[in-house]
Image: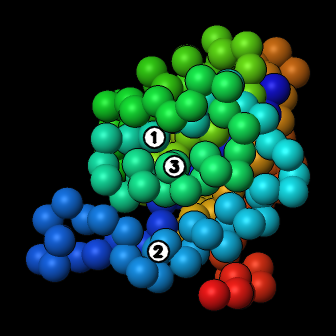
Amino acid sequence: MRVYLVRHGNARSKQEDPERHLSPQGREQVCKVAEFLKPLGLRVGSIWHSTKTRAGETAAILSAAVDAAEGLVERDDLAPNHDINPVRRDIDQAGEDLMVVGHLPFLDHLASRLLAGSDAAEAVKFAEVAVACLEGDTSAGRRLVWMVTPNLLPRVPA
């Protein structure tokens, strides 16, 4: 099983936009990553994302590049400081690949728990729109297969 953990793109400030939509830079970041993912032919059961606007917009853009059988699934337990245990349990019980779009520090803690068994392990640090591909399950253990960030990718032509 593969789990793709994704941090949302750059968002407008709370003062500029109380709902914190993606900024133009954030949209560009997400589009770059989507262009990278598209030829990989990723297939997941669903793309989970938090209730925050920036995560939903990130997930929607990525859904054009990733085949998600059940589409986008908004979850209220993916907030930045939410307890990771319910999501970790749902990942452990999932029978299909998943993509999870969320926030810091939640994603750092979740990745560390999934990879090292401790949310304090700091196994992965997520830049904006970083995608970490974890493979394996609870019985065999998980490992980081690859990770990509927008700054590693060429600029998307306008």
Q: Which mark is residue 132?
A: none
What secondary structure is marked by label 2? helix
Q: Which mark is residue 26?
A: 2
Provide residue 132's location: percent of width, then percent of height: 71, 53
**Real-space Cα separation, disc 2 to disc 3, in angstroms:** 12 Å
What secondary structure is marked by label 3? helix
Please tell me which residue lies in front, 130 or 41: 41
Q: Amino acid at mark 1?
A: His
Provide residue 125's location: percent of width, then percent of height: 60, 62
Q: Amino acid at mark 3?
A: Ala
**CB within 8 Å, label 2 to label 3:** no
Please tell me which residue lies in front, 118 or 115: 115
**Quarter the N terminus occupies:** top right
Mark found first going from the N terminus, 2 or 1: 2
Q: Which mark is residue 49?
A: 1
Q: Which mark is residue 59?
A: 3
Q: Is residue 104 above or below residue 14?
A: above
- Badge 2: few (under 14), some or many (20 or more) residues near its Cα, within 10 Å? many
Q: Amino acid at mark 2?
A: Gly
Q: Nearer the viewer, mark 1 or mark 3?
A: 3
Residue 83 visible within the image: no
How many marks do you count on the picture? 3
**CB within 8 Å, label 1 to label 3:** yes
Provide residue 152's location: percent of width, then percent of height: 76, 80
Provide residue 95's location: percent of width, then percent of height: 73, 13
